[in-house]
Amino acid sequence: MDLSDVIELRLPGFSAEDTFFCGQCFRWRRADGGYDGVIGANRVFVRVCGDTLTAEGCGEEQLREYFDLGTDYTALQALFCRDETLRRAVSFAPGIRVLRQPLFEALVTFILSQNNNIPRIAGIVERFCGCFGEDAGGRRAFPTPCALSGIAEQDLAPLRCGFRAGYLADAFGYFCRGEIDEQALRRLPLDEARAQLMRIRGVGPKVADCALLFGAGRHDAFPQDVWVRRMMQTFYPRGLPDDILPYAGIAQQYLFHYARSSGFFAAAKGARS
DNA sequence: ACTCAGGCTACGA
DNA sequence: TCGTAGCCTGAG
């Protein structure tokens, strides 16, 4: 296969802007009217025109998986929009899709996300790839677990990721030794899958759910950060509607983005004391 | 200068 | 089993 081929995917309603910058991934940049990113071992350039996404740099199968073509967002949004709050969140940024990233990448980036802000996370991730990743055509691929065997906490000093370095080193160990079973994570009951990941130091419920949702295709995993918790307390004191639960993670992404970006909670900031 | 960020661990009650 | 102080670092 020629990786320089331009591949077109039909992706109705897709917004690269909202999808790439709604906080689920950290490696896309705006460039030349499109987006420059790295998927697996490949540097990829993406452009969106109407309902068509064009991509060059990687194969079609890889793209279909990464953009989760198997999930029908039109149907999903119809379901979500029967709920008043979700209807508002979805219409705020209807072009969001939850990406299916590699498990290791999702876990590592969300370990780095804790008590941290997005620009700085992106910086740490770039330094990490720069230090340990293979060349991917002008950018660096996200390092594979194998490439990190023997990497210790002190080797991570250049990342300037602070107390998270020890957590990363622990995670590398689990992956290098093959002690994280991706297939199991995909089929196990949610709490068991979460427990497997939470053996890693620095991985609590939130990070585990992010890894499952973004890195293992578990649409039922429901990461609750401060923003989503605010949404839950305000609009869903009794929890999400039952028919949403199998897709709670995707709903979460709309709720999260809405909570952070709509300004709904902005006034609450100064209102303490 | 100072707060706070997409949590977690460790420790105290 | 609860609740919470402290943590590296740097952006705002």
Image (cartoon, coloured by chain):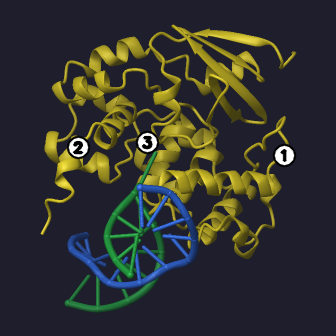
Chain colours: A yellow, B green, C blue
Q: Who comes first in sequence, dot 2 or dot 3? A: 3
State the image coordinates of residue A236 (x, y, percent, origin top left).
16, 40
Q: Which residue is mark 2?
A: A231
**Chain hosting mark 1:** A
**Residue sitting at x 66%, y 22%:** A46
The three-letter amino acid code for the residue at tag 1 is Glu
Q: CA distance from mark 3 to mark 1?
A: 35 Å
Q: Are marks 2 and 3 on the same chain?
A: yes
Taking the image as shown, residue A25 lies to the left or right of residue A76, namely right
Q: CA distance from mark 2 to mark 3?
A: 25 Å
Viewer-nearest of discs 3 and 1 = 1
Taking the image as shown, residue A130 lies to the left or right of residue A180, namely right
The three-letter amino acid code for the residue at tag 2 is Met
Q: Who comes first in sequence, dot 1 or dot 2? A: 1
Q: Which residue is mark 3?
A: A189
Q: On the image, which quarter does residue A232 sit in?
A: top left
Q: Who comes first in sequence, dot 3 or dot 1? A: 1
| Mark 3 neighbour density, 10 Å: few (under 14) some (14–19) many (20 or more) | few
**Chain hosting mark 3:** A
Who is closer to the viewer here, A119 or A20? A119
Taking the image as shown, residue A53 lies to the left or right of residue B4, namely right
**Residue sitting at x 15%, y 39%:** A235
The three-letter amino acid code for the residue at tag 3 is Pro
Q: Are marks 1 and 2 on the same chain?
A: yes
Q: Which residue is mark 1?
A: A134
**Chain hosting mark 2:** A
Q: On the image, which quarter does residue A31 sit in?
A: top right
* Quadrant in the picture for the C terminus of chain A: bottom left
State the image coordinates of residue B7 (x, y, percent, origin top left).
41, 60
Q: CA distance from mark 1 to mark 2?
A: 40 Å
